[in-house]
């Protein structure tokens, strides 16, 4: 039995108890900072390692080498490219200093959010978020209340803005690689415009009230609207834009090219993917070498946000491995009841979305994309079936695509840049909500009605 068939068989055999470490990891992220903040902030690496080791040991004892291969494949094919990309984009964006006269008013912030949302489909949600998060923080550094703009930055720039092209978000790139035409995702333009418009309007109205209350304090008015010469718009470290373009280009071409496979650390990897990761890593290295130190100092660049993301997501990637294996087993796995009950476009939108909120959105997209193909065209080759699905049942693919992108904003771990934006914001002195507070205070009141509206308008 080859590796892929063995992993597929493992997905069928895995019991639901194998997901306990992932649940423990989620609860630790949600409750640790709330109930034991000192313990969490001082030992989050050890907590993440505990759940990761628990998952590896328990499944290895029961399923042996097959389970070990599954974890190794996740680390090599998913986590390693993820952390290389996140690290490179974090380093490159930290070498770009954007200055200007923006004073952090609700209007100027809304313009930055809109610009970021539009950029997200051109350079990816991670690229756009890492490029603009520091300028946005700097524009609002004189404001007393800065949390709201960062939350809506996560909503619009780090997630929903990436819905229009395969460059925007990993699940859409995955669909492109499986036969979805590059410009087909422009069909999500009405969905994206509706969501972005509502979010920007909601942000402006809410922040306008906060801004006016801040102006009741003379010292805040002087800080928010300082006198003197305005700082002209300027970009320093512009060579990093070249490094950024090369890194994004490598991600696209490296995911499409096929140069054969080699054995690497006991698993098989595409040569093109290894070259892709090498190029992305080198772009980050070039950025560190060629960027003047004073630019990073003015950007308040440190390594802690990247360290926090690397450690916590290592635990998440390892513990979510059995969850994804069960999910990709489809109707034959222990979550088969879920796959079998998904029938209407609205079902696909919510099923893909809910899983994307707490699991990686690319596997969630893949699982329900294949489920839709299996429902309508059982046994047919993937690319041929995808072409027929687009012609005959496009609404199903729209639901899967929108669900995987839009719901990524629902939690800090729903999409890669969410956690990074939170970490950078906190390091800059902005008070950000915890995992549970983010969902209860912002996602449920703001995103849930928006997603219900999207369902009613587009996916009935």
Image (cartoon, helix red, strand yellow):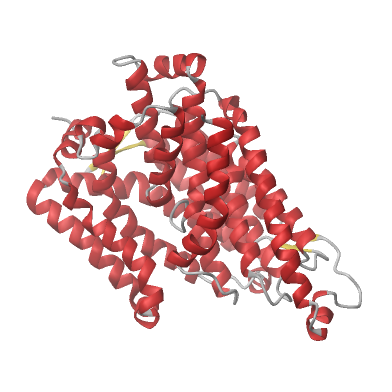
Q: Work out whether 105 lies above or below 392.
A: below
Q: Position of residue 60 (x, y in %)?
A: 12, 52
Farthest residue to the right: give it.
228
Q: How many marks?
A: 0
Q: Is residue 264 left or right of residue 195?
A: left
Q: Quadrant of residue 213?
A: bottom right
- Depth order, front residue of 286/305: 305
Q: Quadrant of residue 66?
A: top left
Q: Is residue 60 left or right of residue 435?
A: left
Residue 207 visible in the shown view: yes
Name the residue: 80% across, 61% down.
234
Name the residue: 43% across, 19% down.
386
Q: Position of residue 399 (x, y in %)?
A: 49, 32
Quadrant occupied by the N terminus: top left
Q: Is residue 335 left or right of residue 418?
A: left
Name the residue: 20% across, 57% down.
55
Q: Work out whether 270 lies above or below 356.
A: above
Q: Position of residue 262 (x, y in %)?
A: 29, 36
Q: Position of residue 194 (x, y in %)?
A: 66, 40
Residue 166 visible in the shown view: no
Name the residue: 51% across, 69% down.
433
Q: Work out whether 32 lies above or below 22.
A: below
- Depth order, front residue of 453/387: 453
């Amino acid at each position: 039995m080859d590796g892929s068939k063995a992993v597929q068989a493992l997905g069928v055999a895995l019991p639901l108890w194998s997901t306990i470490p992932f649940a423990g990891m989620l609860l630790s992220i949600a409750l640790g900072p709330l109930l034991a903040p000192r313990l969490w902030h001082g030992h989050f690496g050890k907590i993440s390692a505990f759940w990761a080791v628990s998952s590896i040991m328990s499944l290895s004892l029961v399923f042996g080498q097959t389970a070990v291969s599954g974890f190794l494949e996740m680390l090599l094919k998913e986590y390693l490219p993820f952390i290389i990309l996140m690290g490179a984009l974090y380093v490159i964006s930290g070498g770009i200093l954007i200055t200007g006269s923006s004073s952090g008013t609700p209007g100027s912030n809304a313009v930055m959010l809109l610009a970021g949302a539009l950029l997200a489909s051109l350079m990816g949600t991670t690229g756009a978020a890492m490029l603009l998060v520091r300028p946005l923080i700097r524009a609002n550094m004189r404001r007393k209340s800065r949390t709201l703009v960062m939350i809506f930055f996560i909503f619009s720039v780090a997630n929903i803005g990436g819905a229009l092209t395969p460059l925007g978000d990993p699940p859409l790139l995955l669909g492109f690689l499986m036969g979805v035409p590059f410009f087909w995702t422009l069909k999500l333009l009405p969905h994206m415009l509706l969501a972005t418009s509502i979010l920007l309007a909601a942000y402006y109205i809410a922040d306008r009230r906060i801004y006016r209350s801040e102006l009741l304090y003379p010292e805040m008015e002087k800080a928010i609207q300082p006198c003197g010469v305005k700082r002209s718009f300027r970009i320093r470290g512009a060579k990093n834009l070249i490094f950024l373009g090369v890194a994004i280009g490598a991600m696209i071409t490296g995911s499409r090219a096929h140069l054969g496979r080699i054995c690497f650390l006991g698993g098989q990897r595409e040569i093109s993917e290894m070259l892709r990761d090498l190029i992305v890593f080198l772009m980050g290295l070039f950025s560190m070498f060629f960027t003047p130190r004073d630019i990073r100092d003015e950007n308040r660049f440190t390594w802690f946000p990247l360290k926090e993301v690397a450690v916590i997501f290592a635990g998440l990637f390892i513990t979510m491995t059995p969850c994804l294996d069960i999910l990709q087993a489809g109707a034959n796995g222990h979550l088969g009841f879920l796959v079998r009950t998904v029938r209407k476009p609205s079902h696909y939108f919510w099923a893909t979305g809910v899983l994307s909120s707490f699991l990686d959105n690319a596997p969630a997209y893949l699982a329900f994309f294949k489920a839709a193909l299996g429902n309508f065209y059982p046994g047919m080759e993937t690319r041929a079936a995808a072409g027929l699905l687009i012609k005959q049942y496009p609404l199903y693919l729209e639901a899967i695509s929108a669900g995987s992108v839009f719901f990524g904003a629902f939690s800090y771990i729903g999409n890669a840049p969410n956690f990074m934006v939170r970490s950078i914001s906190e390091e800059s002195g902005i008070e950000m909500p915890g995992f549970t507070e983010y969902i209860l205070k912002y996602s449920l009141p703001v995103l849930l009605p928006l997603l219900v509206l999207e369902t009613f308008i587009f996916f009935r």
